Image (cartoon, rainbow, N blue to C red):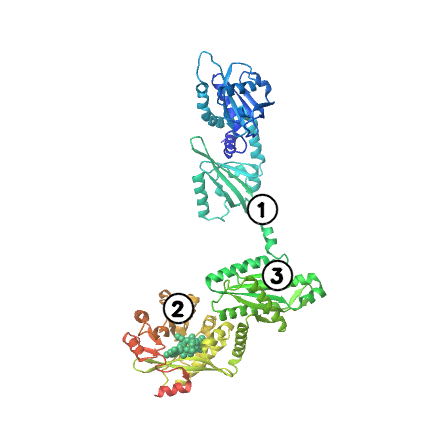
Amino acid sequence: MEREDILPVMYDLVVTIGSEISTKSLLTRTLQRLLYHTSFSAGFICLDVPFCGKAHGQVEVHLDAAVGDFDLIGEIGKPLHLPCALICQAAVREDEQTALLSALRCTQTQYKAYLRLPIDHCGVIVLLAAEIPETNLPLTTMLQPVLAHLAKAIVLCRNNDAYTSGLVTQRDMLEKVFESSYSSVMITDDKSNIIEVNPAFTRITGYTLEEVRGKNPHHLASGRHDKLFYSEMWRSINDSGHWEGEIWNRRKNGEVFPSWLSINQICDTNGKLLHYVGTSSDITKRKEAEAQIHQLAFYDPLTQLPNRRLLVERLQQAFSVGTRSGQHGAVLFLDLDNFKTLNDTKGHDIGDQLLAEVAERLNACVRDGDTVARLGGDEFVVILEALSTKSDEAAGQADLVAEKIRDALTRPYQLSNHIHYSTPSIGVVLFRGHQQSLEDVLKYADTAMYQAKTAGRNTIRFYDPVMQAAIEARAELEEDLRHALEREQLCLYYQIQMDSRNRPLGAEVLLRWQHSERGLISPAQFIPLAEETGLIVPIGLWVLQTACAQLRLWQSNEMTRDLTLAVNVSAKQFRRPDFVAQVQRTLVEAGAKPALLKLELTESIVLENVEDTISKMRELKLLGVSFSMDDFGTGYSSLQYLKRLPLDQIKIDQSFVRDIASDPNDAAIVQTIIAMSEVMGLVVIAEGVETQAQREFLDLRGCHAFQGYLFGKPVPLAEFEAQLKN
Ligand code: C2E
Ligand code: MG
Ligand code: MG
């Protein structure tokens, strides 16, 4: 397609958009052409009329153009004073027409009458008809052909104007616009193949016309938008002929950039699609400016952390999320101890360096969704989200992060050429949803931080005294647990497992902690703590060693030599890469028969990493060790993975056994588990069997191994051995 052909398209576009050419000049040209091409003896004058709206008095008009053989031609450009009534309202009476004619000084009598056509509220075209003596037709009839063709003429005029020499200047102007436009312009044919681009396109994208001619604009796609984006865009273009929006494209040099793109369809008068025209501007700079404004408004320039404004926004969000989820959140209010001294003695540069480093360390301590903000000075706030729904657990989680932060911030700092030591004081307050106001939460956290300072700095304090007490108790327990092994406070209890004929099969070993002040502590209380702190690893090893030593001791006695021992394994322990080697070494060192050792796993261990679990189980099975799936039915109980695990036994959880006789639902679950185990060739054992009725129910349905208070509670070794003798 030639450039000559492109320009009319562009012209058309401009006309369509309606900015460059007024209806008035369009109409004038139309009439000019119309009168020229018909031999109708008529003339017209075009008046420029300011908005007047008056009904009386005079209005000043300018004569814009005139066609016809009369005196007025000499008056073009001059102001005329005409009665408002004639110009601004429909003058239909004969005397009004005569008055207008004389006002227009149409001295030649051949023009008899007129028709007023208001244009765009700002102009008037007066049609003049020559007096034809031999006819006595009314004026409207005489002007009929003119009016009938007017609409058609406008269309014709629009389509042809660009070709006429009279519009060369217009075309030149369009070409200039096209060439010098700051916006990139791309024109395609009806198949979306690029046929023309302007210099701005080349400047922005790096592609010359030669490089993109015939290509689809998708050539510029950045890959940032999905299929849906483009299908929506095309839907809009096809439906309305137009699309406008922000789009990311790729420059020739590979750089991705944002632009504001507007696409228009260009059709001919019959509605046949001819072209697509895309105009766009590179908005990288605007985006950068926006980002910069955002950065300044919401971030602290020294540390790049969110400032108070953003903190408040995030906290508000956290409140809303908490309201929906029921989960707790926590605000940690931090202040660096003795920061002022550093600032005063070493100068602000050094102080700033410390703050920037603190910001970095804080960010490293929290999860992705959490917020670290700087309030100013040496004050920081951390928002933790998605903590437990239980307040005591949430307090534990918040405390853990606070400890981590304290550890991180007390490590030495390298500031310029000297080492600096700093400690924080941390105040913690929990929140859940909108229970408290935002101001209150921040105020409480601040108060707690001051309490931490008074308590001797480098300290963590909860605002809630009950919570503070619970946290302290927990910290104490943790400290005691660290010494439990060496102080020999841990011991194993044995709970007997029986078959249907009341023959002992073995026992499950269950950990007990004999605390010097608190007495016997249940594993339910300290195992989670041991898991969290990693202490479960040495403790679990000790359980394994003790159980294996016991198996070895039982070997010499006929009554006990075939008993198995079931040992609970925690996730942290099982996940260790050396777990298999550890079990093997323990068995060898104790001289125990692997076949008598049964490891109890839970579904959560398996699901954490199915592949790792399977491979470790296989290795251990090769040694002769067997496996039981503990608490079965309470987790996901996915048959998908169950089929793949080299299990020996399934342990029906006590929660199902408890109501087996009264709850038909539980009864059905238990029956299903038993039937399924049969199919898979697994032994089933029921735990928590407390009554004869439960035992009989299970036995009747095919579960022939039991553990529970009906047969015996977990007891110390001596008691267990006495139990065996009965
Ligand atoms: P578990 O492995 O499911 O152990 C069964 C729990 O049910 C034991 O609680 C046991 O005392 C209790 N139980 C047994 N029969 C009955 C009964 O008839 N009725 C009722 N109501 N309860 C019965 P325990 O000893 O408090 O242990 C709790 C959990 O602590 C164990 O659940 C196990 O997950 C964990 N645990 C215990 N010892 C160890 C250990 O050495 N290592 C690891 N990692 N976890 C252990
Ligand atoms: Mg168990
Ligand atoms: Mg269990």
Q: Residue at x 57, y 34 (%)?
A: 177
Q: Residue at x 53, y 59 (%)?
A: 316
Q: What residue type is labelled 2?
A: Gly
Which residue is denoted by mark 2 in the rendering?
Answer: 635
Q: Which amino acid does label 3 sit on?
A: Leu
How many neighbours does mark 1 have within 10 angstroms: few (below 14), some (14-19), or many (20 or more)? few
Q: Where's residue 163, x and y in %? A: 51, 26
How far apart are the two marked residues, 2 and 1, measured between alpha carbons?
53 Å
Looking at the image, residue 422 sits to the left or right of residue 39; the answer is right
Q: Which amino acid does label 1 sit on?
A: Arg
Q: Residue at x 43, y 40 (%)?
A: 239
How far apart are the two marked residues, 3 and 2, measured between alpha carbons?
44 Å
Which of discs 1 and 3 lies nearer the camera? The answer is 3
Q: Is mark 3 on a helix, strand or loop?
A: strand
Looking at the image, residue 670 lies above or below residue 8: below
Looking at the image, residue 452 lies above or below residue 280: below
Mark 2 vs 1, N-terminal side: 1
Q: Where's residue 27, x and y in %? A: 51, 26
The quarter of the image holding the C terminus is bottom left
Q: Where's residue 551, x and y in %? A: 41, 82
Q: Is mark 1 on a helix, strand or loop?
A: helix
Looking at the image, residue 458 sits to the left or right of residue 268; the answer is right
Does residue 63 appear in this view?
Answer: no
How far apart are the two marked residues, 1 and 3, measured between alpha carbons?
29 Å
Q: Which residue lies furthest to the top in this view?
A: 134
Q: Which mark is residue 375?
A: 3
Looking at the image, residue 365 lies above or below residue 119: below
Mark 1 vs 3, N-terminal side: 1
Q: Does the residue labelled 1 lie within 8 Å of ligand 1?
A: no
How many neighbours does mark 3 have within 10 angstroms: few (below 14), some (14-19), or many (20 or more)? some
Which residue is denoted by mark 1 in the rendering?
Answer: 286
